[in-house]
Each structure stands twice: as C-alpha cells, then as structure tokens.
Amino acid sequence: MNSLYKIYLRYQALKRAFKSTKLYLKYAKLKEDLEDQKLNRICVGEDRMGNKFYQYYSYYGLPTRREIRFKDDKERIVNDLAYYDWLYKRIEQPPTEEQVEQFYKEEQLRFQRAREWDEQQEKMMLAFYEQRKIREEQYKKAYLEQKNFNQNPEVFTEIANNSELKQESQNEQWQPKSKR
C-alpha cells in the first residue's frame, strides 16, 4: 500500500512538471479551441484575475448568451468589473484591451483617492476627539463649580421651590378634551 502511494505521488509530480512545458501549453490551447468550436463560442477577453469571458452563438450565427469562466472554481466571489457592462448586456460590443487597461488605471486612481480621503478623515476625527476631550474637561470643571455653588442650602431650596411651582402650573394648564 505504501508503494502505491509513492507511485501516485510521483505521478502527480510528473503531471505538474509536464503542465509547465511548451508542448503541454500547445496541447491545452488546441483542446480549448476544439471545445470552443464544439460549444459554438468565442473567447472575447480575459481579465487580470485570469477569468475568461465567452460569447455563445446559435447555429444561425446570432449571439445568444454571455458567460464568464472563472480561473479557479473556488473563487467565484471575486468578479472583475471591467467586463461587467458587456456581461449584463448594457453594451453590445465587449470592451477592447485598451478600454480594459483604461478601466484598470481609473480604478487604481479611484482607490488612491479613497485611501487619501480615509487618511484625511482619520486626521479630522483625531482632531475632533481631542477638541471634544478638552470641552468635556471644561464642562466637567464648570459642573463642579456649579455643584459647589448649589451646595449652599438657600440657593438649593429656592431652585427646588421654583421647580415644584412650575410643575404644578403645568398640571393645571393641561386639561383633557371633553367628548362631544
């Protein structure tokens, strides 16, 4: 059993080594072309992640559906947006290589601006929190001074009497509407 496993491992290593040769690459290209002819489709482009985009045709030569073939079946979540409009039939023709490169440049600029904006926002938030901390300390100091002032019994009783009178006057003013 152990010898069979060793043979299997050697076979896998040989298979991986063979896949990197020029002959295998030619074979893979020929196999892909034959599959494209069989399925009546054309590869219209490839994105930077290695995903391929295909246009299928009917037997009459009319375009029917558009499809994406992911490079790795495990990573289907990642979808490049360069071919998005074409894939969902918002535009008729697939983007050219120049348009795809232009899209990638614009995307890179957009990410750079977003990073700069995030850094600027973080600096502003730090300044805001520093100012807020200073204000809270000032308010706390003023509150303590006010509290010391209110500990005088004469002032405290006067404030309490005023609040009770105010509450009584509010209760007297509110009357429920009578039913008609």
Image (tube, rainbow, N blue to C red):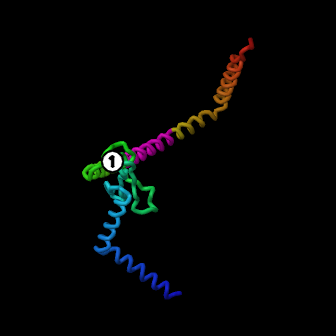
| Residue 130 point in image, percent of width and height | 44, 45
**Residue position marked by numbered label 1 in the rendering:** 110
Magenta stretch: give its range. Answer: 116-138
| Residue 99 point in image, percent of width and height | 27, 49
| Residue 167 point in image, percent of width and height | 68, 23
Quadrant of the image occupied by residue 121: top left
Q: Above or below — where is 147 with respect to 21?
A: above
Q: Is residue 21 visible?
A: yes
Q: Residue furthest bottom?
A: 3
> Relative to the observer, which residue lies in front, 94 or 111?
94
For the C terminus, the quadrant is top right
Residue at position x 69%, y 16% in the image: 173
Tell me the kind of residue under disc 1.
Answer: Arg
| Residue 90 point in image, percent of width and height | 36, 42
SS type, badge 1: helix
Q: Residue furthest front?
A: 60
Q: Above or below — where is 137 with respect to 67?
A: above
Please give left or right for residue 82 compared with residue 169 in the image.
left
